[in-house]
Amino acid sequence: MKTLALGRGLGVGENMLWMHFARRTAVSWARSRDLTPQRLWPVLRERGGLDALLSTPERDLSERLGSLGRARAVLAGPEDAAAERWAASVEASGLRIVTAFDPEYPVLLAEIADPPFLLFAVGRLERLNLPAVAVVGSRNATRYGRDVAARLARELSQAGVTIVSGFARGVDAAAHDAAREGSGGTIAVLGCGLDVNYPPEHARLKEALAATDLLLSEFLPGAEPRPQNFPIRNRIIAGLAAGVVVVEASRRSGSLITARLAADFGRDVFAVPGSVFSETSVGAHELLRDGAILCRGAEDVLAELFPSVGPRAGLVAARSKPSTELSSEAARLYHALRREESLSAEELAQSLDLPAATVLAGLFELEGAGLAVCDAGRYGVVRR
């Protein structure tokens, strides 16, 4: 479901009113413990969008949701003034709220089966729709694992790729910190409220990411880091990225959940080999045995996901020598952009009927060739 299609075709004033209406509804649903994304998205898609869902008779909706109370909570969303007041107080505290119906909502995440209705954010929202790769692994990473994660994240970020990870100890922290050295930067997806300091030893890193990158969470402010939160968080990590790289993972590592989710979403899964004597490499080796792509360095990831950048060719180097040999998808995107002043990735996906991942890869190719630029999440061609 393309999240903004519902508001298109309206006049400017009507569209602003619709966005206000949709935003209040999403906030209301997210505050209800009974209206989970897993429960509601199938019905929302089945009905054909928000307008159609809210026009469904209460009895029909209660049968589909299995509860009259849920049906009433869904239908009451647009009139939930308390939800609007709550959202205003949250944003007054310094957090941004991005709903599934907002233009900033990440296009790739919207493609998964159960994207969150709300994302809470601090930092640079434009990172949400840039080409991204997740780098995940063990909390108890070895020195080798931390060094590999840092090198991967640094080189990918220097090639213009945003690094997504879960802000945990070990591999995640190494990836976030190193990614700050490149233009791609990083997105940290937390398993608690953004106002909760967890892990406590990452307070300085959290402050740095809030200033230069992006902190993200599905969990309401004040939510503690409970064990059940982390698999829920992992679907966001997998959903934001074109591919997931597992650096180190034991047989029971949570990063294997992220890898499995990525495969379910149709995203590429990479694994870094480690020592056969190391327990922290067992999970990564099993992924390789089961068909994951071997990752020996950033070149392997770039070649698979963003081939226009090429081995050892950072985004700056690619821009210095514009290429006219574009993929067919990038050429279609280029011609579409030439007809408009600027378009978002989502608008391009809709108008050309292309998967979001294909659009983002094509836009990355155009940027690397010096043919397109991105400004606040909207793309335009470079006029020569």
Image (spheres, rainbow, N blue to C red):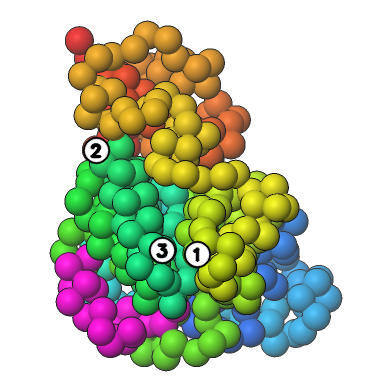
* Mark 1 lies on residue: 248
- State which mark lies toward you, 2 or 3: 3
Mark seen at residue 375: 2
Assess whether residue 126 is covered by the magenta stretch: no
Q: Residues within 10 Å of mark 2 (few under 14, many from 20)?
A: few
Answer with mark 1 or mark 3, whichever residue precedes in sequence: 3
CA–CA distance in space, label 2 to label 1: 36 Å
Range of the magenta residues? 189-209
Q: Residues within 10 Å of mark 3 (few under 14, many from 20)?
A: many
Please indicate, yes or no, whether residue 97 appears anywhere in the rendered image. Answer: no
Callout 1 secondary element:
loop
On the image, the x and y values in percent for residue 15 come to: 41, 49
On the image, the x and y values in percent for residue 231 come to: 57, 75
Q: Residue at x 55, y 49 (%)?
A: 270
Mark seen at residue 145: 3
Q: Residue at x 28, y 31 (%)?
A: 315
Find out whether the residues at labels 2 and 3 contact each other: C-beta distance under 8 Å.
Answer: no
Please indicate, yes or no, whether residue 39 appears anywhere in the rendered image. Answer: yes
On the image, the x and y values in percent for residue 246 come to: 52, 58
Task: Please tell me whether residue 301 is drawn above or below residue 324 in the rendered image.
Answer: below
Answer with mark 2 or mark 1, whichever residue precedes in sequence: 1
Answer with mark 2 or mark 3, whichever residue precedes in sequence: 3
Q: Residue at x 38, y 56 (%)?
A: 148
Image quadrant in which you'd find residue 250: bottom right
Instruction: Give the residue type that dot 2 points to.
Output: Asp
Find out whether the residues at labels 1 and 3 contact each other: C-beta distance under 8 Å.
Answer: yes
Instruction: Give the residue type that dot 1 points to.
Output: Glu
Task: Please tell me whether residue 262 is drawn above or below residue 37 in the rendered image.
Answer: above
Instruction: Give the residue type that dot 3 points to.
Output: Gly
- Please give left or right for residue 291 compared with residue 246 in the image: right
